[in-house]
Image (cartoon, rainbow, N blue to C red):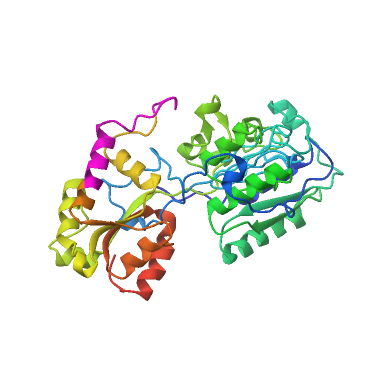
Amino acid sequence: MSTRKRFALPSAVLLLTLLLGACGNTTTTSSNGATSAPAAATGAAAPATNAPATMSAATVMPAMTMSAATAMSTETMSAATAAPVQTMSAATAMSTDTMSAATAAPAMTMSAATATSSGATTAPAGNAGGSTGANPPTTVDQVDAIDPTGKKIEVVYWHNRPQADQDLLQSMFDQFNKSNPYGITARAEIAGASYNDVYNKVTSAIQAGQPPSMSVAYQNQAAFYRGQGAVIDLTPFLTSKKYGLSAADQADYFQTFLDSDANPQYKGERLGFPTQRSMAVLYYNADALQQLGQSGPPTDWKTFEDVACKYSDPAKKHYGLAVQHDISNFAAMVFSNGGRMLNEDGSAYVFNSQAGVDALALLQRLFKNKCAVEVPASERNGEQSRFANGNALFTLGSSSGLPFYADAVNKGGKFKW
């Protein structure tokens, strides 16, 4: 699959910021005052845990990976906008004064008073407590009529990237701040080390009526925000003739990525906008496989099971598979078996099909025969360290973790993988 796609955050922020202050107050709400709070404080169940790290395309196993066209890992998030009082989208949340025309983030959403990009959703301000923003535009004509001229607009983007990424993001925002004709300013803030950290902080900020303008998030988090009335449909912003993306710009995105933020629970509303995507992959120790008589990674689950058990030696703490309980891992196995997690219209779960049963049966056998070991959630990056130390032949993860695996292996076993 081509990697021609360009980094979309700048255009997302541009569209987002242009619209931010045009449909509400003249100034947007800052996210500085928001504090982190346990997810339980919001009365909602915490979203799925972070998706595991991944490996390079050269090491992806056809039979075990899930294609970008068929499924997205839970690791993607939306960078939309969320209204101050509203919730913010999975990828980003914009203040009620702002709206995003189409921001780029794992998934971006826009608050009811503002618009967000795919991946996250924003509910109408006022439904989640706090000050109420203006009614968000729902048609292309309403979006085109927005004029941010003369309005003091500040856009705040919450994310969980490391400092190096923060510096890069802010440099891009600085370029936008200097070049946009409306005097809009944008800044990025690290809101936590994980997506759940950001989620907790966002939900707390929503309750306090001071969410950031944009935030990174998973699609399920965007749906939760939408249920709180904190994000709105980004479709009119994406298709706006004045602020939206042209057909050529939209062609820069794989259609499946764009479609992934259309939430079937809310009649296909676009609750976010894709800024980053990853694939479920299998990491494997190539040197160890060769010693086991394998010329390459297994291409079916039966061979995978046989090789994993052949490698395992509990006395030496060697296991064929080191894995955490993660929905992404299970989903990837179901997809690789030709199954689905949800039916076509998203109205019912269907992972209890034969594909799902086979996936769970495999995991059950691997653990029963001591060919797999569970990595506790408390052991951060445990799969990476066990893989790097040679204690695991295989791990399941996502393509976004490739550099972290590379660092771990370079510090550990330094083997071919």
List x then y, in percent, for residue 73: 43, 45
> Relative to residue 203, is residue 133 drawn left or right?
right
Please name whichever residue, 371 or 68, is drawn nearer the observer in this view of the structure.
371
Vertical side of 88 occupied by 352: above or below: above
List x then y, in percent, for residue 296: 20, 58
Q: Residue furthest right?
A: 150
User: Which image quarter holds the C terminus?
Assistant: bottom left
**Quarter of the view holding residue 341:** top left
Q: Residue at x 74, y 39 (%)?
A: 96
The stretch drawn in magenta includes residue 125: no
> Relative to residue 19, is residue 370 drawn left or right?
left
The stretch drawn in magenta includes residue 353: yes
Vertical side of 268 occupied by 295: above or below: below
Q: Residue at x 31, y 71 (%)?
A: 389
Please name whichever residue, 228 or 145, is drawn nearer the observer in this view of the structure.
228
Q: Residue at x 60, y 32 (%)?
A: 227
Vertical side of 82 occupied by 183: above or below: below
Q: Which residues are magenta?
A: 343-364
